[in-house]
Structure formats: structure tokens, C-alpha cells
Amino acid sequence: MSWNKPLPQPTSISAPFWDGLKAHTVRIQQCAQGHWLFFARSHCPVCGSRQLAWHTVSGHGTLYTFTVARVPTLPEFTDEMPQMLAVVELDEGVHINTTLVGVEPAALRVGMRRRPVFDERPGSVTLLRYTPGDGGHPAVITTDAVPVEAVAVAAPVPSRKQIDCKDLAALRALVSENYSDWSNAVEVTQDMVNQFAALTGDNYWIHTDPERARRESPFGTTIAHGALVQVLVSRLTMPMDYEVTGYTNIVNYGSDRLRFPSPVPAGCRIHGRYRIKSVEAVKSGTQLTMEINVHVVGQDRPSVINDLVMIYM
């Protein structure tokens, strides 16, 4: 996967800490008088000693405080909402700012035991996350992995009921104000956006130039074309509990409504859900209108609203 989020810049003083994370260890400083330090410094803030040494520690600790962020601080973090920002007090007494993974916000309590998780996804650096000490989250998040808590998994469907396309009463029984469960999630990468721009000729900088977008775009990063997000619906498996039968052909008749209410920052993941809005008999067959909403994972506001009209012939 591509990494679209800001990253720390190790310095000559902090480099041993970041090198330790790459080796899947937590390293902190200790002065000659026995005081533990974090963040990395050139002298001890307690006694002023400049005799500092790096030591590998377990990284285990307790949850000192936390907050659940539901509005992203930057567009790049949209797909992590809600984001659990925390301070963990290591067993050595120092405090580390971090984010929590593998836990639901409602389950968080100050004082809970925490263990380190090494996030390799950025590539150039390894980030330190924390997870419940007795939880099942992997100790390492690899470059091809997606955090467990961020995956929107469609509810299992044991079987699909068969409905004949001429059975208007049965089809109309599907009409609902409620949406289905979520589909699978698909990452919208910058490379995908670039390929779509090359194919369509829409290479406007807000889609294809990350550096300029960071400087000038109101979104602070590149965003996917609305049309790209719309067509990516074909890669989303909606959890349908029915199957229409008895037709010879299905015609995509277009859209009664197509809107792009909010952007999809490059590097974010999308998922979708649907509801049946209407069913009616037409001259050529049975017309079904399905409202499909596509969201950035973690966002309440949809990025695409499409009232898709299909005719079963």
C-alpha cells in the first residue's frame, strides 16, 4: 500500500529510538543517575547529566490518558476515524504519545495494560502503536496489512432468496429506508488516481500533483476523481441477501441522482452500502432503483451517492 500521511523526521539525537523501532524494539534513554528519559534529549531534565545511554526496554505500560478523535486533524487521516490518541506510561515511568489499535473506543479505560505494536506500513520509518496487553492484535503491522479495527467487513449472508423479476410484490418488499451492511474496503491509491487521469485526460493538479496539492489545495492533499470513486463500486461486494432471477438481460439505465458530497483523499480506503428505493413495471421489463452510498472508511458523510437504475428484461 502507499503511505499518504505525514511522518516523523529522525534527528541525530533521536535516531537510536527510530532504529530500535525498525528492529521491533523500544529503546529509551537513561542518565548516569538512573533517571529514564523520553523524548530523546542531549541531557537529563531531572539532574542535568549529559551522561546518557540508550537501553532496550519491554515497551509495556499502562494507559495514562486518551481521547477519541472523530474529526481528522489532516485529510490524510480520514480513513482512521475514529482515531484513538493516547499517552502510555511505560513501566519505567516515561510517557509516550501514541495511537491505539486493536480495540474499540468504548472499551478504553485509564490504567489498562498496553503492549507495543510496530507499524511498518510507512516504509521509511516504523511507527509505534499500542494495543491491549491481553489482546490478539499482531505485534507487527506489515506493509501489506490493514489494521484489524479499520476493516469494514460485510456481514455473512447464509443464503440468498431467489426473486423472479416479474414478481413485483416480492421485489417491492425489498424497498427500505435502511441501508445494508458495509461492503469490503478498497484502497484508492495515488497510482490508481494517476492511471485514471491518464486514461480520461483529466490530469488536473488537484488529483495528480501531491506537492502542489499540499501547498494550495483546500483539502491539503490530492483527491480522487469523483467519477473514479463511482466506477470503483464494481470492486465493492455489497452484502445482498437476495438474487433476482428469470430475466434474459439487465440494462444499466443510468442514474436518477449522482452526487459527490465529500472528497476521497488519495491513499484512503472506501467501502459502500445500498438500499432499494423503488421497483416499478415498465414497458421493457421491471425497473429497480438502488441507492448506493460510497464512504471513506470511518466517515459518516458519503463521498458518492448514486441512485442507480436497472431494468430487468
Image (cartoon, rainbow, N blue to C red):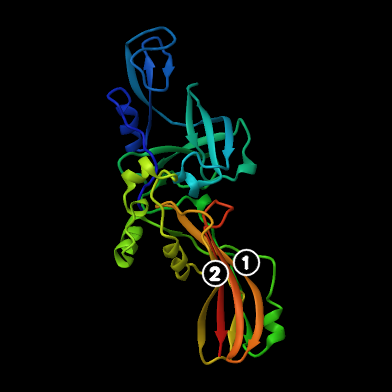
Q: Quadrant of residue 161?
A: bottom right
Q: Are marks 2 and 1 in contact (CB under 8 Å)?
A: yes
Question: Can residue 120 be seen in this snapshot?
Answer: no
- Lateral position of residue 174 relative to residue 69, left or right: right
Residue at figure coordinates x 32%, y 32% from the top left: 9
Q: Considering only vertical position in the picture, is 209 above or below 84?
A: below
Q: Is residue 160 left or right of residue 303?
A: right
Q: Report which residue position mark 2 lands on.
A: 238
Of 231 and 14, the residue lying toward us: 231
Mark 2 belongs to which amino acid? Met
Circle 2: element type: loop
Q: Quadrant of the C terminus?
A: bottom right
What is the x, y in percent for residue 310? 55, 80
Q: Percent from the top left, x then y, of residue 74?
A: 46, 41
Give 307 or 172, whichever is nearer the viewer. Answer: 307
Q: Is 308 positioned to the left or the right of 188 in the image?
A: right
Which residue is rendered at x = 46% and y = 38% of the image?
A: 129
Mark 1 lies on residue? 180
The residue nearer to you, when weighing 44 against 169, is 169
Density class for disc 1 (Cα within 10 Å; few <14, some 14-19, many ≥20) is some
In the rendered image, the vertical position of residue 247 relative to residue 201, given as above or below: below
Coordinates of residue 20 in the picture (x, y in percent): 33, 32
